Image: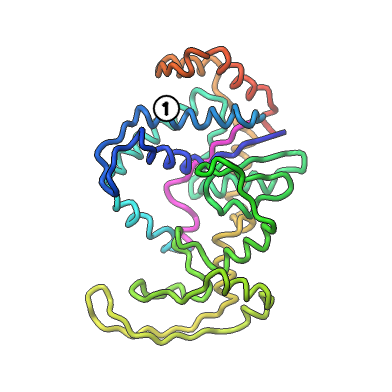
Amino acid sequence: MLSILVDFNNVKMSRLFCKDVMEKTKYTVHNIDYDIWKYAVFESIYNYVVKFSPDEVVIATDSKISWRKLLFPLYKANRPEQRQKYNINWDRYQEISDSFTKELKEHFPFKFIELKYAEADDIIGSITLNSNDDHKIIIVSSDNDYLQLTKNGVQLYSIMKQDYISHPNPDMWLKEYILRGQPKDNIFNVATPLDYPKELRKPPLGEKGAEKMLIQGLDEALDKYVSYTKKYHDENGKGQLYKSTVNLQERYNFNKNLIDFNKIPKSISKKILKIYKNYEYPHPNQILVFLQKYGWPTFIDNITNVENRLFNLYKSDKNG
């Protein structure tokens, strides 16, 4: 059995910033054509069906809030600032995105999975880690987080590169990733205390530093405390003194809980697997209803081939 697990937010955002969808100069967005965006999103998913000929397609969708945010309030706290670089009406985007996702779910034999407090990472991670050796998986995302899963018949296909990406040692990659943190998600490296002031430059721990710790041996490298005494000015310009001591092993364990998919809470993983195994597709006639509504020539003019490819997804055992 072959499944493709699609990081849906990754697909939607990659299509949003296409030149055919968005008119922009640097950070100034002049117009977003959501009709073209809808077409581009659907075309992307359909093209993956054509390219990989899977037995099933899972569309993993982010919840509005993640369990990681509850564990670490600063998780992804940098995202709003990043989004503000573009004068996009994000409320409107979310409204249209939610509506279109609902449409796709009601018309196509794709397993749309969303769960409160779960991210696409959790959905893809839970399904992958609980699959058997006969279950081949292709994860579709440009997010390198999934490299940790690329073993035992699991591959990662990059949306941006339109090619497979891999690492010779996924387990070692994960350890390095935990050590260095995830700046894109505002997860600090293990040398940085969790209460470190945003006004201060974070202690460095790059690729060479992490490699040195791995060569030394993690148990030995993490068996120490690091102390900081630093002066800085807060956001109001007032002078402050920051003092803290961090235990590297404790910080590593904290990062591991956020990054390692094996640490996804069992309660969340069990609910994801239940939805996945008991998923019910809409009636096959809904495919034509959807395509007639939008009237996209690329698909309408080839409706027989399109339906035949998608009908194949109904033939697979819904329990995988």
**What residue is shown at x 61% (from left), y 44% (from top)?**
164
In the rendered image, which quarter is residue 279 located in? Answer: top right
Q: Residue furthest right?
A: 133
256 shown above or below 160: below
Q: Is residue 67 magenta?
A: yes
Tag 1 secondary structure: helix
Q: Position of residue 36 (x, y in %)?
A: 37, 28
Where, quadrant-wise, is the N terminus in this rendering? top right
Q: Is residue 43 magenta?
A: no
Which residue occupies the foreground of this view, 163 or 108? 163
Residue beneath disc 1:
39
Q: How is the image coloured?
A: rainbow
The amino acid beneath tag 1 is Tyr
**What residue is shown at x 45% (from left), y 58% (from top)?**
184
In the rendered image, which quarter is residue 22 located in? Answer: top left
Where does the magenta region start and end?
56-71
Which residue occupies the foreground of this view, 302 or 252? 302
Q: Position of residue 290 (x, y in %)?
A: 45, 19
Which residue occupies the foreground of this view, 279 or 121? 121
Q: Position of residue 224 (x, y in %)?
A: 59, 84
Q: Residues within 10 Å of mark 1 (few under 14, many from 20)?
A: some
